[in-house]
Amino acid sequence: MDVTPLAQAVIANDRRALARAITLVESARDDHRAAARDLIGQVAVAGRQALRIGLSGTPGVGKSTFIEAFGMMLTAQGLRVAVLAVDPSSARSGGSILGDKTRMERLSRDPMAFIRPSPSQTHLGGVARRTREAVTLCEAAGFDVILIETVGVGQSETMVAEMCDLFLLLLAPAGGDELQGVKRGIMEMADIILVNKADGDLKPAALRTQADYAGALRLLRRRPQDPEGFPRALAVSALQEDGLQAAWADMQTLIGWRREHGHFDSRRAAQARHWFEEEVRQGLLASLGREPLKGLMVRLGAEVAAGGRTPDAAAAEVLALLGRAV
Ligand SMILES: Nc1nc2c(ncn2[C@@H]2O[C@H](COP(=O)(O)OP(=O)(O)OP(=O)(O)O)[C@@H](O)[C@H]2O)c(=O)[nH]1
Ligand SMILES: [Mg+2]
C-alpha cells in the first residue's frame, strides 16, 4: 500500500483524507499497521505543531458542552481546532459519536473544526497509540489546537496527560465544602482546574468549590514547569460561555512561559521517550501471547503448577528465549 498520496492529502488539509488516515491508524491488522507507521513517518516531515490540550472530567460534568463552547470561541478567533476523544471504557459502541455530535452540533458543522470520536476499542495500549497517531495526523493537517477529551476513569487520564502540552481537569460544583473524591495524582497532573456550571443556582457552590481547589493546589509541591500562580483553579460556565476567554488567556500565559523556559520542548521530548519505551513494553507483552512463547508459557506454567519446576527457573527460560529473539 502506497501511503504517499494519503500523506500528501493530509498535509494539504483534505478532511476526508484525514478521516481515512485516522481510520488506518486505528486498524489492528498487521499490514495496516505497517502502512500506518509509514504514513506517520511521512506526515511528520511537515513539522507542524499544534497546542495539545488534554481535558478530563467525570461523565456529566460538561466536557462536551465545554468543548463545543471553547472550540467555537477558538475558531471564531481564526484558529483551527481538532477534537479527539479517548474513552477506553467505551462500551458505547460508536454511540459516543452520535451523543457527542449532537452535543457538539455547532462545532461539528464548523469548517474550522474537526471532531473525531473514540473508536470502540477496549485495549488501553491500542487506544494510546491510536490517539497519539491521530494527534500527529491532525498536527500535520495544520490544526492549531487539538483537544483530547477523556472521561475520568482508570488510566486514561494519565495516558492523555502524557500526550498533551496542557492538562485541564473539569469539575462540577461540590455539594458540601469537602473536596470531591479527586485523587491526588490527578490533581497533580492538572495545569488548570475548571469548576464548571458556575451559573444560576449552582454559582455559589461553584465559587466555593473553586476556592477550595485553589487552596488545595497551593498546598501541592511546586512543579518546575509552572510559573508563579500555576496550577490554578477557575470557575466557568460552559453553558453560558462564561469565563472561557479568561481560561484561554491563562492557558496562553502558561504555555508562553513554558515555551520561553524550555519546558515545552523538554516535555515533548520526555513524552516521545516515554511512548517509545511504552511501545517496546507493549510489544514484549504482546509477544507472550503469540507463538512460540504462547505455547511455551502454557507448557512451563503446567510444569510449575505440577511442582516440576520452580517459577524462577521457568521464567528464566522464557526470558532467555526473549533475549535471543532480539
Ligand atoms: N448549568 C450548567 N449545566 C451544564 C453546563 N455544562 C454542561 N451542563 C449540562 O450538564 C449535562 C452534561 O453535559 P455534557 O457536556 O454532556 O457532559 P459530559 O461531561 O460531556 O458528559 P459525558 O459525555 O457523559 O461524559 C448537560 O445536561 C449539560 O447541559 C454549565 O456550564 N452549566
Ligand atoms: Mg460528552
Image: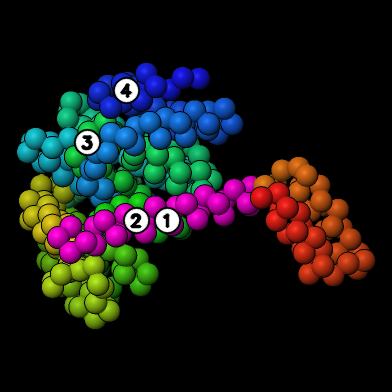
- C-beta proximity under 8 Å, tags 3 and 1: no
The amino acid type, in three-letter code, at marker 2 is Ala
How packed mark 4 is, by other alpha carbons closer than 10 Å (few <14, some 14-19, many 20 or more), is: some
Which residue, given by chain and number where applicable, does mark 4 sit on? 8
The amino acid type, in three-letter code, at marker 4 is Gln
Nearer to the camera, 195 or 268: 268
Question: Residue 57's image quarter?
Answer: bottom left
**Predominant secondary structure in magenta?**
helix
Chain-order first, disc 3 or disc 1? 3
Q: Secondary structure at mark 4?
A: helix
- C-beta proximity under 8 Å, tags 4 and 3: no
Which residue, given by chain and number where applicable, does mark 3 sit on? 143
Residue 163 x, y percent position in the rendering: 35, 51
Mark 3 or mark 2, whichever is nearer to me: 2
Residue 68 is left or right of residue 31, and the answer is left
Which residue, given by chain and number where applicable, does mark 1 sit on? 273
Residue 289 is left or right of residue 229, and the answer is right
Nearer to the camera, 206 or 124: 124
Q: Residue at x 66, y 50 (%)?
A: 326
Residue 124 x, y percent position in the rendering: 50, 49
Which residue, given by chain and number where applicable, does mark 2 sit on? 269
Q: Which residues are magenta?
A: 259-286
Residue 31 is left or right of residue 184, and the answer is right
- C-beta proximity under 8 Å, tags 2 and 1: yes
Mark 3 to mark 2 CA distance (whole Å): 21 Å
